[in-house]
Amino acid sequence: MSGITGIGQRLYRGEVSYDFVGRWKRWYVISALILLVAIGSLAFRGLNLGIEFRGGADFAIPSATCSVAEARDVAEAETGGQTIVTVATSGNMRVQTIPLTSDESIALADSLGAACGVAGSDITVQVVGPTWGAEISSKALQGLGIFLVLVTIFLSIYFEWRMAVGALVALAHDLVITVGIYALFGLEVTPATAIGVLTILAYSLYDTVVVYDKVKENTRGIAGQSVMTYDEAANLAVNQTVVRSINTSITSLLPVLAIILVGAGLLGAGTLLDLAVALAVGMAAGTYSSIFIATPVLAQLKRQQPEMKALAARVQARRKQAARTASSTTKSSDEDAADADGSSDSGSGAKSSQQTASPEALRELARIQSGDRQQPKRQSRRKRR
Amino acid sequence: MAPPATSKPGRSLIALVVLLIGGIVWAFWPGSDSSVRLGLDLQGGTQVILVPQPVVEGTEITEEQLAQTVEIIRARVDGLGVAEAEVTTQGSGNSAAIVVAVPGVGQDRVVELVQRTALLNFRPVWNVLSPFPIDAAADPAAEGDSTADGDSANESSGDTTSEDTAANATAQDSADQGGVQSAEIVQSPENTPEFQAEVDALSCIDPVNLAGGTPDNPVEWLGACDQTGVQKYIMEPAFIEGVSVTDANAQLTQQGIGWVVTLEFDSEGAGALADASTRLSALPECGTGATPCNAFAIVLDGVVVSAPRFNEPIIGGQAQIEGDFNAQEARDLANVLKYGALPVTLEVVDITSVSATVGGDQLRAGIIAGLIGLALVSIYLLLYYRVLGLVAVLSLGVAGALLYLFVVIFSKTIGLTLTLAGVAGAIVAVGITADSFIVYFERMRDELRDGRSLRQACDSGWVRARRTLLAADFVTLLAAVVLYFLSIGSVRGFAFILGLTTVIDLIIAFWFTHPVVVLMGRRTFMQGGSKWSGLDPERLGGHSAIESLAGRSRRKRRDDYRNRAKDAEGNGDDAGQSDQQDADDSTEVRS
């Protein structure tokens, strides 16, 4: 635990910096591979749609004493159609048949109950017309569309349109992966799945907003200096929020895992379990994309901006200048600088090259933005507070 | 940067406590119902989702029609006598859905009640036939066979008498009768072979034809089955439509033995009834092979519910149906008559019937999962944030209490029902609520690392975290609101809880977590940077953090500032320089 905090400290100060933004190619390739698998399984395996989308009748028999074959025989004899029988760990049995009328479903529930040693009234029955699922989905998609338009407007106003694009790319990434996982493992898609997917939508955007807010803070007034490029400032933001991202994903996933455990252990397949599986996958993808996809995409968009191009050139020029100065002074200047900085463990972070932002540069920028707040050399600057 | 967020943290806490106490008092006022309304998936029962279709294809369903339909269904469901049965609409226009939820009642009764909520028409009976389909090639004698069954039909059909007794009887009958009859012969089934073929082919022993849902156009002739499948009726166009029924009740007979159903019609219906009863009561009894015959059929959703004969003309719009009813049958028939006429037709798209045992199991599983999730998150937060974690856990606890309170309040006021999807939403919210604290605590730690004092960090960290929280929670709230208004089914319940927890998240963060952290920041325990505070300098690692947490008084620190300032000026690093200048100078200072 304290290890994480220590790392958090160094991440924050830019002493340990992981190049999330610069290594975008790596993340894109990883994501592209995952997306390829997701889209591939979606295309070739398709989704296993629940009866809500196909139409049919579903009988959940608690603690059934009959065998799968017996239940299937009873159901198929009575409905004359194909029947799917599944058994959950706790002995709960699920029988899915072709669409039935209300009376037929009551009759079948009684027969199944008689065969499986359960009262017919204890069997949970669901009968769905084939058009209902389509209706739910079209409603959900309509809602999704309107929500996306509104959220794009909000993000464009609160941040800027580039961030809105980045957030939407990350969102699409998460949704495709989640749906792909469903296709890959043949998990049943139910209305609960739809709820899960919609939660992921909110969660993914929430996560991205938190990271982007830090990016926004770090890049305030960035065009007015020449210490740091936008990429580096954005990367610093990701590094600074990475501990929070990890903590948040852990605290979000723990309850979801609890649902999966309890759901699988006590209930067998059901609404809770369906929901939790979608959430677990989506949240993991959401955390990943807010770090590895959303910010690199944003940085790439920003790179096209003339001011940012100019800034990058300025920073480059300044670093060349600094390199020349450094090579003309004594070799120990780096260590001196580190000592003067007062942080005993900053040696590890001092492996600055001229091409990337050094910890010192990061701190300089942070100081520029936050005015009197960040004072790496406290001996000389602390009095400003 | 905005000014420090809370100068008087006590006030926010007091405000929250007042809100909580006020809410609790209101919600749990003795004598009022303060239970959480549970959805059917949590307590067992039957839910039926209906999609209304306009009677005339291609037209739009108006809000009024929808409201009327819901009113009718609600009245019917209430007739079941189950408390907390509910009927709600979701969506609007032709894409609306009506959700009927009846706790604790099996599928059979609810579906029957609701599914039969269709068009109600009163039709004169032309003839009563046997329930079997008739081969088109067969001779007309086949019709004669039906008489055998006719008598048994009359037994169940019952008789009708006018409430004002037989005094105003037969005088004008014959005249009326003659006129109407001559008009009808033109339309008789024998003259329209297609209709005749249709009726012949109809099989009342096929349950499909007893389930209802057959189109019933009131201005056309109709061949239909009775609801038990023992009769087939050929009926003239309707003389009264269901909307004309103003009231219907099941009553004990005056003798106190058996039940009757009383009926009242509006003026239009009364006129039509007077005409029809006058004409029909003069006709020969049905089942004798005579066409037309003396009976009128109450046709609901294309199925004959009852076909009583007229004992006499009924003038004045009040009628009484007598028969061999038991209390239940009489009440059901009265309900059909009173609420039968719907302005739309309904299609049943989803029936879910959950047994009470399973419902209880799901609720228990949801609660257990929620508690386990909460415990795991609490352990994690305590391990990671120590005393701050304790604040976070407390905040989660208060958030949970607040959620329960709000659910009770909304159950009472707007009829919120807690469903399994809602429970799942609440469990998911644990993580999202915890995130607010994490964002705040991490910001605070950042501030400490930057060399601020704990007291400053509590406030300035909050100012920065607050903005992030507002933006991020706004997005979640937006999702919840859009989903709530646009979705149907279980998604809606989920969206409501998601939105509710997001608002609670903000309330807790603003009025509880931040004030508590600020108050704690004033204690020496936290300022001392104890290992258990979650903010100990060792773990944070910053030198300046150690300084600021070392328990120095403000004044002392200020003195230090001054001394150092002098030193620094002596060293030639002028603190008055602009930031930009500093940045540019830094390399030189170092070398």
Image (cartoon, coloured by chain):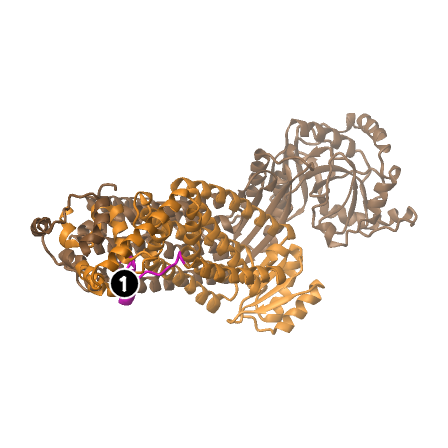
Task: Kindly identify the residue that appears in the image at 57 percent across and 33 percent down.
Answer: B64
- Neighbour class for label 1 at 10 Å: few (<14), some, many (≥20)? some
Residue B247, percent across and down?
60, 35
Location of residue A97 in the rendering, given as x and y in whole percent from the top left corner: 65, 62
Q: Residue at x 88, y 39 (%)?
A: B190
- In the image, residue A240 lies in the stretch drawn in magenta: no
Residue B418: image location, x then y, percent:
45, 52
Of residues A350 and B220, which is closer to you in this image?
A: A350
Residue B33 visible to an observer of this rendering = no
Residue sitting farthest toward the front:
A328
Horizontally, residue A385 falls left or right of residue B470, namely left
**Quarter of the picture holding the N terminus of chain B:** top left
- Give the residue at x 87% y 47%: B143
A110 up-or-down from A147: above or below: below
Give the secondary structure at mark 1.
helix
What residue would you read off at disc 1?
Answer: A349
Residue B67 sits above or below residue B78 on the image: above
Q: Which residues are magenta?
A: A1-22
Give the color of chain A as drawn: orange
Amino acid type, label 1: Gly
Q: Chain letter of disc 1?
A: A
Chain B's colour is brown
Does residue A223 appear anywhere in the picture? yes
Q: How many marks?
A: 1
> Observer-nearest residue: A26 or B117?
A26
